[in-house]
Image (cartoon, rainbow, N blue to C red):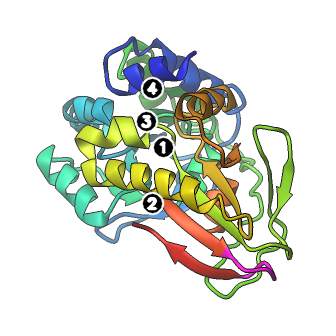
């Protein structure tokens, strides 16, 4: 799909089939697998231990963002689903935590009168459940198995919720999903180790000692899609792109732009590079590991490393 078509989809001007397909691809390795063992804390302080729910009741996790138009459109029905299933299914609204503030999340919660627990993800749950679109629905049955991953509020979602709500757990020990190593969150002054990425051109870049380096964390749809819902962010993304291109002409610092995988594939990132005529190398953070390693939750963010590979500065316009 061409990048322009993706922007049309994001802006609500094209079919939602692509979002469904992305969610299906994300769920291909998840369906039938054990749910993640994660402990979440709602914005109101409620502790939700997912592992303790498996074997007792189903779980419905809905990933969403306040700037996401389909998420806003689905919100009223989401509350209705909670009212319908909330006593039989543990329903949790999982905000992506991507270019959000708690104030934004609370305003969304109040606007749509959401009564289910609302949590703000730090990126770790998204990583475990292959978050690729917003919204993304994940339904886990009472046996702790993932049975549905989708994008739309459609009949397959309704069928999955009804099925898990009316099926009792089989009992017995439940094998939990293996937990990967928690990515380090490097801070200013830390030496960055164990991190590498491959650019669109196929060059592997390791963040060790050498030339000073500047990393621009972004999403290629920021300038266009967020123009309506987050105009200040869209403006910042455009400004950082232009300024970075200018600063990169000074060869004393190596520049690299790293995109989130949310609503972005390598092919789409390549289309963006062509359309914007970027000169800075681009890379896709395939699983969001690099964003998590640097603790990046907002775009655009610029992380600067000195010649020893230490973080010297982090800027989020």
Q: Which residue is mark 1?
A: 57
User: Residue 171: x and y, percent?
Assistant: 65, 41
The answer to which of marks 4 and 3 sits earlier in the sequence is 3
> Where is residue 78, by image quadrant?
top left
Mark 1: few/some/many CA within 10 Å (<14, 14-19, 20+): many
Looking at the rendering, the stretch of residues picked out in magenta corresponds to: 305-310
Q: Under tag 1, what secondary structure?
A: loop
Nearer to us: label 4 or label 1: 4
- Rounded to the nearest angstrom, the CA distance separating label 4 from label 3 is 7 Å
- Work out how far the residue at label 4 is from the one at label 1, CA to CA, in angstroms: 23 Å
Mark 4 / mark 1, whichever is N-terminal: 1
Check residue 298 in the rendering and tell me which mark sits there, or answer none.
2
Q: Is residue 24 visible?
A: yes
Q: Earlier in the sequence, mark 3 or mark 2?
A: 3
Distance CA(mark 4)–CA(mark 2): 23 Å
Q: Which residue is mark 3?
A: 134
- Give the percent coordinates (x, y) of residue 168: 52, 33
Q: How far apart in space, not on screen, are marks 3 and 2 (Cα)?
A: 16 Å
Going by the image, does 196 lie left or right of 271? right
Answer above or below: position of 54 versus 270. below
């Amino acid at each position: 799909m061409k990048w322009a078509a993706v922007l049309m989809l994001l802006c609500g001007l094209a079919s939602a089939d692509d979002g469904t397909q992305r969610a299906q691809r994300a769920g291909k390795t998840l369906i039938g697998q054990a749910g993640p063992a994660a402990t979440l804390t709602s914005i109101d302080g409620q502790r939700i231990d997912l592992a303790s729910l498996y074997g007792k009741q189903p779980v419905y996790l809905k990933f969403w963002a306040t700037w996401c138009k389909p998420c806003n459109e689905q919100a009223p029905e989401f509350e209705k689903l909670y009212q319908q299933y909330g006593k039989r299914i543990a329903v949790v609204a999982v905000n992506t935590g991507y270019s959000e503030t708690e104030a934004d999340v609370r305003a969304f919660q109040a606007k749509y009168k959401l009564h289910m627990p609302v949590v703000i993800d730090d990126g770790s749950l998204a990583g475990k459940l292959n978050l690729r679109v917003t919204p993304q629905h994940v339904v886990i049955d009472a046996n702790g198995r993932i049975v549905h991953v989708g994008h739309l509020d459609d009949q397959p979602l309704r069928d999955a919720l009804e099925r898990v709500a009316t099926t009792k757990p089989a009992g017995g020990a439940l094998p939990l999903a293996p937990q990967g190593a928690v990515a380090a969150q490097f801070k200013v002054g830390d030496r960055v180790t164990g991190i590498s990425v491959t650019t669109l051109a196929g060059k592997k870049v390791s963040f060790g000692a050498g030339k000073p380096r500047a990393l621009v964390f972004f999403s290629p749809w920021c300038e266009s899609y967020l123009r309506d819902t987050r105009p200040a962010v869209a403006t910042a993304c455009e400004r950082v792109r232009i300024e970075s291109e200018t600063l990169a002409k000074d060869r004393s610092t190596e520049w690299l732009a790293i995109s989130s995988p949310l609503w972005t594939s390598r092919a789409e990132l390549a289309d963006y590079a062509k359309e914007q005529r970027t000169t800075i190398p681009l890379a896709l953070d395939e699983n969001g590991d690099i964003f998590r390693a640097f603790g990046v939750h907002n775009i655009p963010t610029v992380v600067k490393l000195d010649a020893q590979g230490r973080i010297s500065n982090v800027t989020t316009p």
